[in-house]
Image (cartoon, helix red, strand yellow):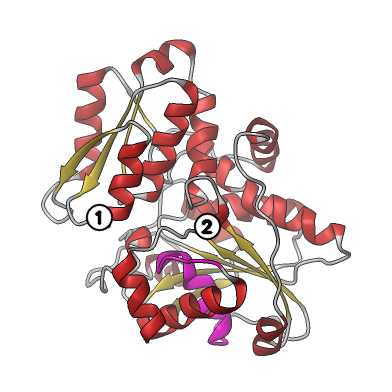
Amino acid sequence: MSDPLPTFEDVRAAAARLAGRVVRTPVLRHRLLDERAGATVLVKPEPLQRTGSFKLRGATNAALLLSPAARRGGIVTHSSGNHGQGCAAAAHMLGMRATIAMPSDAPAIKVEATRRWGAEIIAYDRHGVDREALAETLAAERGATIIPPFDHPHVIAGQGTVALELIEDAAAIGLALDAFAVCTGGGGLTAGCVLALEALAPQAEAFAVEPEGWDDTRRSLEAGRRVAVEIPGSGLCDALLSKQPGALTFPINHRHLAGGAVVTEAEVFHAMRFAFEHLKIVAEPGGAVALAAVLAGKVAAKGGVIGVVISGGNADPAVFARALAA
């Protein structure tokens, strides 16, 4: 990987670049959540983002940094849904073409939402096709630029604005983070948030939260190097199905993360229902894992302040119904 590691200054610059283009999501609190956690819990609800996910931040930041010539060629990416929708929305915003390779088993709600932004959808077999190679082929055919889901400095910097906003809004009400829990797939959101935490809240212990069977970041942190999961878990948390941390994201995450937490499907469903009933937020399974870890006591800051990211809300209706009925 030849790209340089992004810095906090890149996150700060991304925040200025994205102002007015993405939603500055609020900080949510609830008395019952504080009681359950034994801490002051500050929730960052990215389901309220324009595309229902934090992914719009990184995609838009990367798209804005393309040269005029690159913009004329359009963009290509591969995604199970949220990043694809973010790229499609960013391309629509800037008048560019977007081609999104999506697994054939991606949730229909995410496929249709991506198509509504005007993107071309290319379906592929998640288990039989090399998605990176497919994206490279599509980009070559179209003269387009690839914006990958997580392992790109401009994408990482854009995602870091999630934690930057949370830290700033916490300070505005006189609070400082002692802990931070974030949903982790390839590690782009986590890495961007780590950059903000290192600069503005170095005292906060940060934890990567992953679904059971997809804990490649936790295993990599313990091994001190990137390792891949060999027997993956279920596909419930489709937004987080990365088998190995990124070549750019892992060095950033390794130097700051206090550890990783793993949550079960039952814990994810409980968090989705809690978010709906008490925070009035629809959280998709992958978006709910950090909240699940806090509710299950797997990430704690007893007596302190903990920041929690709900990263997305593009839940398949049938899956959401299962969560409410669980």
What residue sits 66% from the left and 82% below the top? 33
How many residues crowd mark 2 within 10 Å: few (<14), some (14–19), many (20+)? many
Foreground of the two, 47 or 215: 47
Q: Which of 69 and 52 is in front in this view?
A: 52
Task: Report which residue position mark 2 lands on.
Answer: 47
Mark 1 lies on residue: 106
SS of the residue at dot 1? Answer: loop
* Residue drawn 52% across the image and 74% down it: 276
Viewer can see residue 210 = yes
Looking at the rendered structure, the kind of residue marked 2 is Pro
Viewer-proximal residue among 237 and 48: 48
**Left or right of 71, for residue 307:** right
Q: Nearer the viewer, residue 97 or 293?
A: 97
Q: Whole-percent x and y of residue 142?
A: 24, 19
Q: What amino acid does circle 1 point to? A: Ala
User: What are the residue bounds of the magenta stretch?
Assistant: 281-298
